[in-house]
Image (spheres, helix red, strand yellow):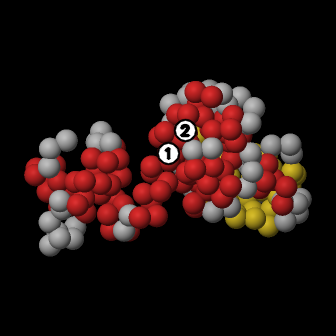
Amino acid sequence: MIGSLRGKILEVRASSILLEVQGVGYAVSLSLPALAVLQACAEVFLYIHDHVREDVRDLYGFGTAEELDFFRQLIGVSGVGPKAALTILSAGSFQSVKNAVMAGDISMLTSVPGVGTKTAQKVVLELKGRLIEEKETAPQDREVLDALLSLGYNSSQAREALKNLDPSLTDTAERIRFILKNVSK
């Protein structure tokens, strides 16, 4: 899987770039704000989301790891694929889109072509709490919180479980085991 690319931009297209990395050209899709600042012949480093389906392999590029993480959260929402997520990120600057989701601004999301009211509501409902909690969550608790969310806990249950965690436990695996043994879902 491709995680990042560094190379020379050969061509800037309408919604992507052709990036040459050691003689190989990669077509990488980018958001419109990201495309606006890039120029041909420039050297660039991008974080990459490598999206593989049975019939196609698409690369999506981002200037920061935070943008990549937000993109992955967007495609985790039911009904939002990578192209729709990239379109949502094209609605404005990365921070303005993220702020709109955190503020519950459905009108900004529905202004994006192809994003209806139901999809915008799902995005806000599923991501609003997560985005706010990321700022409040200590780095050592983030892995435990992510593990609990992937195991089916909702956000409030996972946060409550973290509060009941034995402070003497430092290893992530031990912390998860403790919660699974001692805290009911």
**Tag 2 residue:** 123
Residue 68 locus on image (x, y percent): 59, 54
Q: CB under 8 Å between callouts 1 and 2? A: yes
Say what amino acid the circle numbered 2 marks: Val
The 10 Å Cα crowd at callout 1, few under 14, some 14 to 19, many 20 or more, is many
Q: Quadrant of residue 171?
A: bottom left
Q: Is residue 50 left or right of residue 139?
A: right
The 10 Å Cα crowd at callout 2, few under 14, some 14 to 19, many 20 or more, is many
126 shown above or below 119: below
Say what amino acid the circle numbered 1 marks: Leu
Q: Is residue 130 left or right of residue 33?
A: left
Res 80 seen here: no
Residue 83 locus on image (x, y percent): 67, 36
- Residue at x 86%, y 43% (from the top left corner): 14
9 shown above or below 54: below
Question: Marks 1 and 2, Cα distance to the nearest angstrom?
Answer: 6 Å
Residue 163 locus on image (x, y percent): 23, 61
Res 43 seen here: yes
Q: Give the structural element (helix, strand or loop) at label 2.
A: helix
- Residue at x 49%, y 39% (from the top left corner): 125
Q: Give the structural element (helix, strand or loop) at label 1.
A: helix
- Residue at x 24%, y 59% (from the top left corner): 162
- Residue at x 18%, y 62% (from the top left corner): 165
Give whichever of 176, 40 is nearer the camera.
176
Residue 121 locus on image (x, y percent): 56, 34
Give whichever of 162, 27 is nearer the camera.
162
Count the labels in the image.
2
Q: Quadrant of the C terminus?
A: top left
**Tag 1 residue:** 127
